[in-house]
Image (cartoon, rainbow, N blue to C red):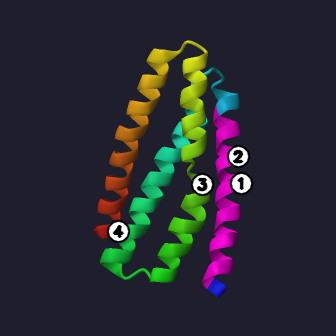
Amino acid sequence: MITLLAVGAAAAVGAVARYVLDQYVQYRSPGLFPRGIWLVNITGSFVLGLVVGLGARHGLPPHVVTIVSAGFCGAYTTFSTFSYDLVHLCEKGQVRESLWYAGASLAMGLAAAAAGLTLGAL
């Protein structure tokens, strides 16, 4: 029960962190391209990889891995907003940008997760 409550608390922190970072980045760099959510998803992939690496290699307790991965990262990163942003770019005629966003999100997300996992396993 304590882990469940901790996952919920971590999710609340993750959701607020996502909102704040997205708004900050979009304010500093306005435009159609969703730079804020892109950065959120890349950094979230890194954090998830790092925590899993720390758990696998250095014995970070499983409940901590669960709290950070399912709680914080689960609420911090967002596939639904990513999908919406892709559709929105296409609707605005920004097909090239939408393809770049999708490709860069996938490539950088995988690279960030791998980097975090590697760092966590050191």
Tag 3: amino acid? Tyr
What is the spatial separation of the Cα atoms under label 4 and label 2, in whole angstroms? 27 Å
Q: Where residue 120 sits in the image (x, y, percent)?
A: 35, 66
Q: Nearer the viewer, residue 100 or 122?
A: 100
Read off the magenta span: 3-25
The secondary element bearing badge 1 is classed as: helix
From the image, tell me which residue sits under label 2: 20
According to the picture, the residue beneath numbered tag 3 turns out to be 76
**Residue located beneath label 4 in the image:** 53
> Image check: 63 left or right of 55?
right
**Gap in Å between the C-alphas at discs 3 and 2?**
10 Å
Q: Give the x, y percent position of residue 6.
A: 65, 77
Q: Is residue 74 magenta?
A: no
Q: State left or right for residue 20 relative to residue 64.
A: right
Which mark's residue is nearer the viewer, 3 or 2? 3
Query: Quick check: 109 above or below 113?
Result: above
Q: Which residue is mark 1?
A: 16
Q: CA distance from mark 2 to mark 1?
A: 6 Å
| Secondary-structure class at tag 2 | helix
